């Protein structure tokens, strides 16, 4: 499938998945009310943290698979290694999630204790499902290595569609509010686990190479083995770098709901969730394009074709930035109709929040574009240098401004932390590599 067709399929899947999630907002507010919807938003925000449960092996194995995808012996060995790694991750991740989730939940939901619902129980259920999903989603990364990145978007979109259908029919049943809340939590996350399992099965049957004798696998040159200790060590180091980087990135991007749960009103959290969902929908399309050029950046940068990569990144940033500004105008013009559509007018969309989130996503896009190029050649150490600084800046600025301006202050605090670090550092570092003409392969 050509690059343009893959992009179109990926965008279509992203659009369908995002539309499903946006339509679900209306059903969720009808079923739960604004206050409980705000609690659900806080619970679901941790899915992003739990999706790091692959401990960085997803992108590390993606890079290794891209490097050896034409070698049938290596592909089979790598596929077996993926299965072993997933088993080990589950043995560690699930017990750890079960142990930590109740502790975090008891702190997180203190402001909502009067609602007489065991939010910690729902929090544990959601987190366990998401850690299972994260480990299975390693196969989504491998699809990109096979030039089949559109499948990594199709399966999550199908999961979102199933969630929408399940939540939509829930209103026809007479259930207590606590039971409804628990079922909604399950309906939101479990279909994504099913989608990951389908993706893993699809990858196995679609990309498994032809039959190779056991002797070929066992007696192949030691330098051509995935299990080679040197290669295992290199992949583990790369995975650790990806994981630490992802952890810091999520700390930068997703402490917002944690702060909001302590200082913001439920209606403000709901406003943020709705407006951010629209921007996240658009940004998912833009970021899908960035991920699709991952193999291109990896190949071009290893050949020292910096100018070609930089030109492509600038074009994507330009198109993405203009798209976000146009979307800002759309939301501002139709914000009243959107509020009626998604919440029957219960949750209004503030203009200040619409503008602030637009600038935040533009600042994020500039840094993310160059981050994808650097990650494609395992140049992630620069992330570890500035992300701790960005996290501390974002946390302090968001708390300081949040106490004064609530949700709007939190968004501007995150925006400032991006402008001071992520937005320009990655571009500078790629230019530095170009001047040094140094890329370690």
Image (spheres, helix red, strand yellow):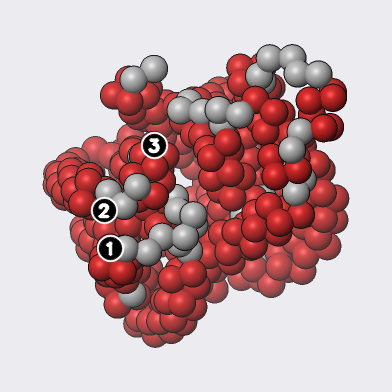
Of pointers 2 and 1, the one earlier in the residue sequence? 2
Element type where label 1 sits in the image: helix
Q: Is disc 2 in contact with disc 1, using a CB cutoff of under 8 Å?
A: yes
Of pointers 2 and 3, the one earlier in the residue sequence? 3
> Is 107 situated above or below 79?
below
Determine crowd level at label 2: few under 14, some 14-19, many 20+ residues with C-alpha closer than 10 A: some
Element type where label 3 sits in the image: helix
Between 300 and 405, the residue placed more toward the observer is 300
Q: Residue at x 31, y 52 (%)?
A: 304
- Which label sits on residue 434? 1
**How many marks on residues?**
3
Element type where label 2 sits in the image: helix
Query: Residue 413 at x, y = what percent?
Result: 34, 75
Between 292 and 44, the residue placed more toward the observer is 292
Query: Residue 236 at x, y = what percent?
Result: 68, 58
Q: Residue at x 58, y 64 (%)?
A: 241
Q: What residue is shown with label 3?
A: 292
- Which label sits on residue 306? 2
Q: Is residue 375 left or right of residue 427?
A: right
Q: CA distance from mark 1 to mark 3?
A: 22 Å
Determine crowd level at label 1: few under 14, some 14-19, many 20+ residues with C-alpha closer than 10 A: some
Q: Residue at x 60, y 59 (%)?
A: 238
């Amino acid at each position: 499938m050509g690059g343009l067709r893959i992009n179109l399929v990926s965008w279509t899947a992203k659009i369908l998945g995002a539309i499903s999630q946006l339509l679900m907002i209306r059903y969720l507010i009808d079923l739960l009310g604004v206050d409980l919807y705000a609690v659900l938003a806080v619970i679901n925000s941790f899915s992003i943290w739990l999706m790091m449960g692959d401990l960085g092996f997803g992108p590390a194995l993606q890079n290794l698979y891209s490097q050896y995808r034409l070698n049938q012996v290596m592909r089979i060995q790598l596929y077996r290694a993926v299965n072993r790694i997933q088993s080990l991750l589950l043995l560690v991740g699930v017990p750890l999630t079960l142990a930590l989730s109740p502790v975090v939940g008891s702190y997180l939901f203190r402001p909502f204790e009067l609602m007489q619902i065991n939010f910690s129980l729902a929090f544990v259920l959601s987190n366990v499902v998401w850690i299972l999903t994260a480990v299975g989603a390693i196969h989504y990364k491998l699809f990109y290595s096979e030039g089949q990145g559109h499948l990594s978007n199709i399966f999550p979109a199908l999961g979102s569609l199933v969630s929408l259908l399940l939540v939509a029919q829930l209103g026809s049943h007479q259930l207590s509010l606590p039971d409804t809340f628990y079922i909604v939590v399950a309906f939101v996350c479990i279909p994504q686990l099913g989608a990951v399992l389908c993706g893993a099965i699809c990858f196995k049957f679609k990309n498994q190479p032809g039959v190779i004798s056991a002797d070929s696998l066992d007696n192949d040159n030691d330098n051509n083995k995935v299990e080679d200790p040197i290669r295992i060590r290199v992949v583990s180091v790369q995975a650790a770098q990806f994981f630490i980087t992802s952890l810091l990135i999520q700390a930068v991007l997703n402490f917002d709901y944690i702060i909001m749960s302590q200082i913001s009103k439920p209606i403000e959290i709901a406003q943020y969730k709705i407006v951010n969902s629209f921007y996240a929908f658009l940004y998912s399309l833009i970021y899908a394009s960035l991920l699709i050029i991952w193999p291109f950046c990896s190949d071009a940068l290893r050949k020292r074709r910096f100018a070609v990569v930089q030109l492509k990144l600038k074009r994507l940033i330009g198109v993405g930035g203009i798209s976000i500004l146009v979307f800002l105008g759309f939301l501002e013009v139709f914000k009243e109709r959107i509020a009626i559509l998604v919440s029957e007018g219960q949750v209004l969309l503030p203009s200040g929040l619409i503008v602030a989130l637009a600038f935040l996503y533009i600042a994020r896009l500039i840094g993310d574009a160059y981050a994808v190029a650097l990650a494609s050649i395992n140049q992630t150490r620069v992330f570890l240098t500035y992300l701790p600084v960005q996290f501390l800046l974002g946390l302090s600025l968001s708390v300081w401004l949040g106490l004064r301006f609530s949700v709007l202050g939190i968004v501007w605090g995150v925006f400032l932390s991006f402008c001071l670090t992520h937005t320009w550092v990655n571009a500078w570092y790629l230019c530095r590599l170009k001047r040094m003409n140094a890329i370690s392969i």
